[in-house]
Amino acid sequence: MTDDVRMAHDLSRIDPHRFEQMVLALGVRVLGYGLRSFGAGADGGREATFDGPVPYPAPGPGSWNGYIVVQAKCRRTKIGVKDAEWLIGQIKSELRAWLNPASSRARTRRPQYLIIATNVQLSSTASSGGIDRVEAAMKEQAAELGLLDWAVWDGNQLSTFLDAHPEVARTYADVISSGDVLTKALETIDALGRSVSPTPIRLGQGQPGAERKFQAAYDKAGGAAVLGMPTTEAYEEGPGWVQEFPHAVICAAAEGPAVAVDLPVWEALLDAGAGHGRLAAVGYPIVDAHTPAFIDDRAQPVRLHGGTWNDGHLLQKMGGWRWEPKITFSFNIRDHDRWRHVEPLMDLRLRCALRVNWQASHELTIDAQGRRNMKSFVAGSWLSGFIVRQANRWGLDGSSLKWQLTPDDEGYNDSRFACYRVMLGSPPGPAIGAWLRLSLPDSLRGEVSCIIDLRVNFPHLQPPDSLADGLALAAASRPLDVQDLVEFFAGAWEANAWFLPRAASPNLLFCKTVGAPVIECHIVAERSPGRGLPYTVDLLQVVDLSMYGEAPANPRPMMGASVSAPTSLELPQITTTVIQLLAHMASGFGFLESED
């Protein structure tokens, strides 16, 4: 309770499922019987809807007429941030989901009117009070979302509705009556010589088939001495079931065993996927021989499975809980041919591309300071150092290395795009070139994308009279080997994931990723045979991959693979992962290890 107001009803003990039912019952009475019951929203949010005219906020002129969404936000713990901050975070997450093109919610109908119903109590102190701060948070994005109006039904407003509709209050009296009311009721009953023996909630009650697994998890965690007794029935949450206790939950994926989870860890799980399906996004804890009987903040990382973001884990990092993906290799690639028609063609292209969806990344822009930050970083980066080392190795002068804006046909530069390049060696043409391209989300692409290319023209390293002879000479004496590939891809990965996006938009330092970031690595012979060019290049002429075993009889002109991994990996971890990724790539493109 806050100091300036006291609710007639205590909504702090109600569980999310019954809270939704109570809000629906009140919503029907306030808005009308056209209110459709709560269901999982497009991103897993719980919402009810009404389409048409309603006598709200008052009958007559000014009443709402359109598509209305009611969202229930039930807070079950006071651990962590204060009520107003918690609710503001929930509201921002929901509104951003509608505005984020990568979110499935963005592909659904947007509300014209929005009601946020919550059991938290907001103070009315002018300016600094919870009501005014929540109103300010709504205004920030309401115009962009296209809201005509909105309302917040906090604990005080809901208490007023309950007073106006006592039949609803009576239905939920067991969980919303204040302590004083309960005490007086019990004293009255006791005076009458009666005893109160409420029927206890059974483990797994409410979800047929859950009783046995919930009982096993309860006993394994220490039973009533550790968990107490259930405060709610088991209810569905994403792809599994949950039952709440005073300071913990027991949860289970629909087809898996159950486990007890400490409440702060459980709330961190819900927050990690907030606005994107919660547990439907991040999944449920993996329960196996390595899982503790009671998952608390000492059991890190919390391994997760079954969510739409694929396997991952929850851990405390950078001052809070974060979801991170499990490192997973794949041949699913998407960015191998973006900007591939840049002229002139060169013999070899190495590409490292990152795609990542950061929360609130759709609000970012690249300004003049961001460009200065990018140029300052890249000028002194490992990437520039790698280019200089290669230039020196090949007899070129790397001292003149200078990053410049690309021409328009090689990359865009505006508030959403930043594209730079560096070229070494001329005449007769560039021998080494590097490009970096950063793009922020738009209506077509919901992710931040960062691509770094290194391209090499081998004949121009030491130009002879014949291009073909020059290629043979240069490639025979100066091919890139696996160590070169590892150095380039590791340095480019670190620049893509850590430095370039955050240099352009520093606020990304404080944003969590939504879903698994994807890093792609590509090795491409741009002058592949069959294109009618003055000379052609076989990939294995310019890249030595012999350490991976016998090469395929007909090597492809392009090799590529991807990995899902956290953006927070440090360079030694990145290097190890790149080595594994290149081995994965070689095996998928026909390189055979020796059988001897």
Image (cartoon, grey):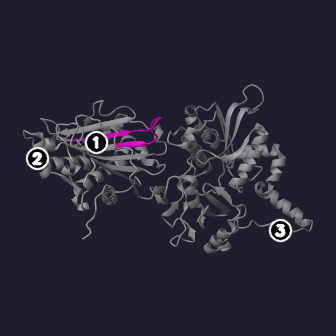
Quick one: label 3 or label 1, which is nearer the N terminus?
Answer: 3
Q: Is 136 in front, or is 52?
A: 52
Quote the CA–CA distance across marks 3 and 1: 72 Å
- Horizontal relation, residue 206 to residue 137: left or right: right
Residue 80 visible to an observer of this rendering: no
Q: Do labels 1 and 2 touch, CB within 8 Å?
A: no
Magenta extent? 433-450
| Residue wearing tag 1 | 376
- In the picture as drawn, the residue positioned furthest to the left comes out as 465
Q: Earlier in the sequence, mark 3 or mark 2?
A: 3
Q: Position of residue 78 (x, y in %)?
A: 63, 56
Location of residue 48 (image quadrant)? top right
When the figure is inspected, residue 428 is found, relative to residue 167, above or below; the finding is above
Q: Amino acid at mark 3?
A: Ser
Which residue is at a point 24% across and 38% down the rendered structure image? 531
Residue at numbered disc 3: 197
Residue 407 location, quadrant:
top left
Estimate the x, y position of residue 128 in percent, counting from the top left.
60, 41
Residue sitting nearer the eye, 498 or 192: 498
Q: Amino acid at mark 1?
A: Ser
Mark before the other along the chain sequence, 1 or 2: 1
Q: Which residue is mark 2?
A: 395
Q: Amino acid at mark 2?
A: Gly
Give the farthest residue toward the right: 192
Q: Nearer the viewer, mark 3 or mark 2?
A: 2
Q: Is residue 444 magenta?
A: yes
